[in-house]
Amino acid sequence: MARVAQVVIPADKQIGVALTYVYGIGPKISQLILNEAKVNPAKRVKDLTAAEEQKINEVVDSKYLVEGNLQRVVTGNIKRVKDINSYRGLRHKAGLPTRGQRTRTNARTRKGRAVAVGGAQPKAASKT
């Protein structure tokens, strides 16, 4: 049971892949961390020595923002653009895409479920 940045990473995966389970570490950063710690990326997490695990932890702690600290920074950045009422901030407030994507069609991830406009369908004739 290896821990990197207070996150338990899966023991049966290769260390290069397992590091990507930490928020803020992707494949490229994982590769850079392992190169600096001089650990083989194909090695399984369960086969790591305590020294290798410690080296990886030291590199991550000293050079990279991960997990809670990174999430705090990102949340602060979003709050800042909302507070200054920039265009991006207004889009964040409205729950719409912030990076110029179209919204006439698609954008369902940001906008949520499509809601039918009332009265759009003709009423069915009823017997009287």
Image: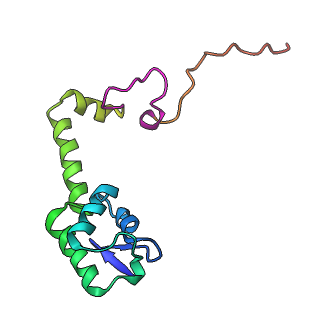
Magenta stretch secondary structure, dominant: loop
Direction from residue 9 to residue 37 in the image, left or right? left
* Near-viewer residue (59 or 110): 59
Residue 39 pos. (x, y %): 29, 74
Residue 92 pos. (x, y %): 29, 35
* Vertical placement of residue 84 versus 116, above or below: below
Give the farthest residue toward the bottom: 50
Residue, x 34% and y 66% (percent of image)?
19
Direction from residue 9 to residue 118 in the image, left or right? right
Q: Quadrant of the N terminus?
A: bottom left
* Vertical placement of residue 17 versus 49, above or below: above
Residue, x 37% and y 71% (percent of image)?
15
Direction from residue 5 to residue 124 in the image, left or right? right
Residue 66 pos. (x, y %): 24, 61
In terms of image quadrants, where is residue 32?
Answer: bottom left
What is the magenta range?
A: 97-111
Residue, x 42% and y 71% (percent of image)?
14
* Vertical placement of residue 77 versus 7, above or below: above
In the rendered structure, does residue 100 fall within the stretch colored magenta? yes
In the rendered structure, does residue 80 fall within the stretch colored magenta? no
